[in-house]
Structure formats: C-alpha cells, structure tokens
Image (spheres, grey):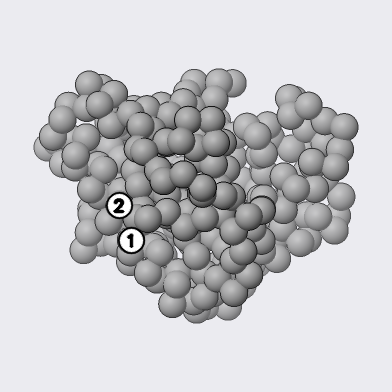
Amino acid sequence: MKLLHSGKVRDVYLDGDDLVLVASDRLSIYDVVLPTAVPDKGALLTQLSLWWFEQLTDLVPHHVISATDVPAEFAGRAVRCRRLEMLPVECIARGYLAGLGLREYQAHGSVSGVELPPGLVEGSKLPSPIFTPTTKAPVGEHDEFMSFGEVEALIGAGRAAQVRDLTLAVYARGAEKAAAQGLLLADTKLEFGLDPSGTVVLADEVLTSDSSRYWPADRWAPGGPQFSFDKQFVRDWSAGLDWDRTPPGPEVPAEVVEATRARYIEVYERLTAQEWRSSP
Ligand code: ATP
Ligand code: MG
C-alpha cells in the first residue's frame, strides 16, 4: 500500500483502486496534534463509524468496502473504501449552538449565512437544524464558513441542494438514534464524494465523536459549556495551561487521557448497545 496522505488523526493509503483509511490513537485539539495518544481511540472511532454507516444505508450510499480486508497491523482501526472524487466542502449540520458555530453567531447573528434568532446562548437548541458548510482548508489552515450560495458556485446548485438535504437527513437520523440512548447530537460534520457514475456517496468517517458533538441529554444546560463525549474534555483541561494553541501541543496527563478514553467508550457503548472489547 502506498501512503497518500497523513492527516492529523488518520492515514490514507492507496491499495489498487481502493483507499484504506487508518485511524490512529492520536488526538488533536485546535488543529494541533498532541504528543500523547489515547489508547483504543482509533479502533473506537472506526467501529462507531462502521456501525453508523450501516444505520444510514437507506438514506445514502456509503464508501465502505470492507472492515476486515485490511493489513493485520491495522486490524480494527482501518476501513477499505471506494476511492471517490471528494466534494470540496465540509458538510456540517447543527441542531445546537457550540464551538465555531457559537462564535460565528456571536459575531454575526448568523452561521454560514443562516440567520438565527437573537438571544441564543452556548448550548441553545436551534429552532430547527441548519446546514453550515465550510471550506476544506489545506493542512495548517482553518476551515471557513461558506454560504449556501458559495457552495452552489463551487459544486453546482443541484449538488449543493443534494448534499444539504443529505446532511440534514443524516443529522436527523443520528439525532433520533442518539436521543433514544439519552444523548443529544449537537452537530456533526460529513464529507461526500462522487463515484465514477456521478452518484453522491457518503465518505470519510460518520457520526463519530471526532466528527460530532454528543452531549448527555440529562446534563444539558444552555448558557455555558456542555458536558461532552469528545475531546472537549481535553480542550477544557488545556484552557488552564499557558499554551497559545500552536504546535507543539502539551503532554496530556494520564488521568485526562483515561477520562477521555472512558468518554469515547461510553458513547460507543451507548449508541451501539454493545460492550467495548479492545482488540487483543
Ligand atoms: P483532519 O483532522 O485534518 O480532518 P484527519 O486525521 O481526519 O485530519 P484527513 O486529513 O481528514 O485526516 O484524512 C482523511 C482524508 O481522506 C480526507 O481528506 C478525506 O476527504 C479523504 N477521504 C475520505 N474518504 C474518502 C474516499 N472515499 N475517497 C477519497 N478520499 C476520501
Ligand atoms: Mg478530516
């Protein structure tokens, strides 16, 4: 296999016509990879993503070919998939206000050109879920919000409407299944690609705790940061440091690593209703 690309967290290999996406145990916050790994994180996110792809097959075709036909050294944390022509848009759906969406709202009263009512606070539920696409920034740069018109100009009006509708449909399905397990799906990021026939296919990872914000519904309290099943815990820990969010990132103490791992496991177990067993 040929290494095509090494992302902050995942490595992408080319194997014949296929791609093999390999998730590592690396953790990134504010686009900086931290020097400390979270054991099992790559496998947890890979297995959660595979589970979700299966829950969505009636909504959208996906890129997965096999979760097992991968090199032994990557077993459990790699996915063989169809190589697609990726659309240059990060397709984000938001049902609640958090993260960059919150900051954009505070600055402009809208996100990706979608006007929102005044008076919303951190963690607020939006009147209805919104599509807030961003650019896919090259390594080292940050993604920027795009208006729907900008997406239309980039990929065509028909495709733009299609990926918006698919993004909101996947969000709705994700939010519904999460709610059944007592979780709120605050937001999620999807990527789509085109297969050789021009069909839009769901790619990358889907509804993982790296690409999504999950909150326990019973602790939801708008007006401040929410208890979160993702790396928000590490972000909050890092806020107490004298670190300017540029590389190199700080070493993460063992108890923060363990608490973060426990959160990834909890979200996996609650969503899939399966006990997590780390691979031997
Ligand atoms: P980041 O945190 O910056 O997103 P990452 O560790 O998640 O990094 P990426 O850099 O996103 O890794 O690497 C995954 C790459 O694989 C992305 O560029 C994504 O668009 C691409 N990709 C995912 N699925 C496919 C596919 N089926 N065909 C082609 N490219 C794909
Ligand atoms: Mg990515």
| Up/down of 82 relative to 87, above or below | below
Is residue 277 something that shows in the picture?
yes
Outermost residue to the front: 118
| Up/down of 183 relative to 23, above or below | below
Q: Are marks 2 and 1 in contact (CB under 8 Å)?
A: yes
| Quarter of image, res 99 | top right
Nearer-the-camera pick, 94 or 238:
94
- Give the Cα distance between marks 2 and 1: 6 Å
Disc ID at residue 172: 1
Nearer-the-camera pick, 14 or 182:
182
Left/right of residue 79 with respect to residue 119 in the rendered view = left
Q: Please name the residue shown 25% across and 42% down the image.
A: 163
Left/right of residue 225 with respect to residue 54 in the rendered view = right
**SS for tag 1?**
helix
Q: Mark 2 — residue?
A: 168
Q: Please name the residue shown 78% across and 26% down the image.
A: 244
Nearer-the-camera pick, 129 or 53:
129
Left/right of residue 261 with respect to residue 111 in the rendered view = right
Nearer-the-camera pick, 107 or 16:
107
Disc ID at residue 99: none
Q: Please name the residue shown 74% across and 37% down the image.
A: 34
Which corner quadrant holds the C terminus? Answer: bottom right
**SS for tag 2?**
helix
> Residue 266: percent from the left, percent from the top?
62, 70
> Residue 37: percent from the left, percent from the top?
73, 47
**Does the beta carbon of the residue at mark 1 sit less than 8 Å from ligand 1?**
no
The amino acid sitting under disc 2 is Leu
> Residue 144: percent from the left, percent from the top?
46, 26
The amino acid sitting under disc 1 is Ala
